[in-house]
Each structure stands twice: as C-alpha cells, then as structure tokens.
Image (tube, rainbow, N blue to C red):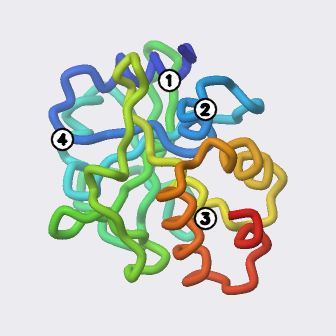
Amino acid sequence: MFPECKKAAGWMDGFERPWFVAGGWAIDLFIGKQTRPHADLEIGIFREDQKALRDQLADWEFRKAVNGSLITWNGEYLNLPVHEIHAVDRVHNQQTEILLSEREEGRWIFRRNFGISCPAAEAILFTEDDIPYLNPQVVLLFKLKARPKDQADFHSARDFLSKEQRYWLKQGIRQMDIHHPWISYL
C-alpha cells in the first residue's frame, strides 16, 4: 500500500504491544488511497508502552515535545501533558512523530476530554496488509481545528464512515464544541 506506512510497519515489526499509524495517513489507510500530501508520518502507542518503544527503536534518538520545544528524552516515564515524541534514525535517515495515547481499563481515552472514550480494541483497525491504524472516528476528533488539512481529511473520510463511527464522532464533537460545523455533516 503506502511505502511510508510500510516503513513504519518495518520499524515496529516484532513490537509486542499495540501500535498504529495516526494522523492523515490513518485516514488514507482507512479509505485505501492517498488523499493529500503529508508532511510527516505519525505513529501512536499507548502511554504505558513507552519503554518498550525505546527498546524497539534502540538506535534512534528521541526528543519529547514540552511547551512547544523539543527536549532530549532520556527514557524517564512521560506523563501528561507530554504526549508527543520525535524520533530520528540517523543511520537510515528516517524520522517519525510518536503520539502517546491514554488507555484505562481496556478503553482508549481522549486526552483532551477524559469523558470521551471507546473500547481500546475498537480504536485500532487494520489494513488487508495488517498495518494497524487509528480508527478514523478518533483521528477526526483530534482534527477539530479549522486547518485546511483537517477539513480535507474530514471531507475525504466522512462518506466512508459507518453509521456507528459517525454516531460516535458526532457525540464526541458535541462534547468538545456543540456548535462545530462538522456536526451537520454527520
């Protein structure tokens, strides 16, 4: 399918914890075609698996995003509000952004509003090639800003969403912004 996503699958081969492609690439994996250019590749893991990730990508360099700055991450446990890690493999000239997701009692938790959740098993879907990606209902909940790329991702994905995905997304958006324009499209 997409070479960038297959590269991520290669990096994560043998990782025995859940992981997934996130962001715009997750929308494209869901739809089955690339809908727009992407500046980067984001992958996600559950927060409690961050040490296992460092072990998996042992030769990579890591920086955590803190208050808009990137600071070397030395392996200490990252709690909220830190949720973003930038990883670079200088040997193979590769990089990715890693997003830490919250999970509690078998449920994926939206870090911007802990009242929004879904079963963790439903938060991650798989392509026919077994590449895991974040459920588009979840991806779109993170994209409620008015940025052109987020609008494009919503309009690309909405017709592919199931009735259940539309309902979940609509309820989540209502909890975040009762007047959000996407509600009328769902």
Q: Nearer the viewer, mark 3 or mark 2?
A: 2
N-terminal of the pair, mark 3 or mark 2, is 2
Of all residues shown, which one is farthest toward the right? 148
Tell me how far mark 4 sits from mark 1, CA to CA. 20 Å
In the picture of the structure, the residue carrying the numbered disc 2 is: 31
Given the image, on which type of amino acid does mark 1 rest? Cys
Tag 1's secondary structure?
helix
Tag 4's secondary structure?
helix
Q: Residue at position x 67%, y 86% from top?
A: 178
Q: Is residue 136 above or below residue 92?
A: below
Disc 2 to disc 1: CB gap under 8 Å:
no
Given the image, on which type of amino acid does mark 4 rest? Ala
Q: Which mark is residue 68?
A: 3
Displayed quadrant of residue 25: top right
Taking the image as shown, residue 114 lies to the left or right of residue 151, namely left
Of all residues shown, which one is farthest toward the front? 163
How many residues crowd mark 1 within 10 Å: few (<14), some (14–19), many (20+)? Answer: many
Q: Position of residue 48 (x, y in %)?
A: 20, 57
Disc 4 to disc 2: CB gap under 8 Å:
no
Given the image, on which type of amino acid does mark 2 rest? Ile
Q: Quadrant of the N terminus?
A: top right
Tag 2's secondary structure?
helix
Tell me how far mark 4 sits from mark 2, CA to CA. 30 Å
Disc 3 to disc 2: CB gap under 8 Å:
no
N-terminal of the pair, mark 3 or mark 4, is 4
Tell me how far mark 3 sits from mark 4, CA to CA. 25 Å
Tag 3's secondary structure?
loop
Q: Quadrant of the C terminus?
A: bottom right
Q: Is residue 2 above or below residue 148?
A: above
Tell me how far mark 2 sits from mark 1, CA to CA. 14 Å
How many residues crowd mark 3 within 10 Å: few (<14), some (14–19), many (20+)? Answer: few
Q: Residue at position x 49%, y 66% from top?
A: 168
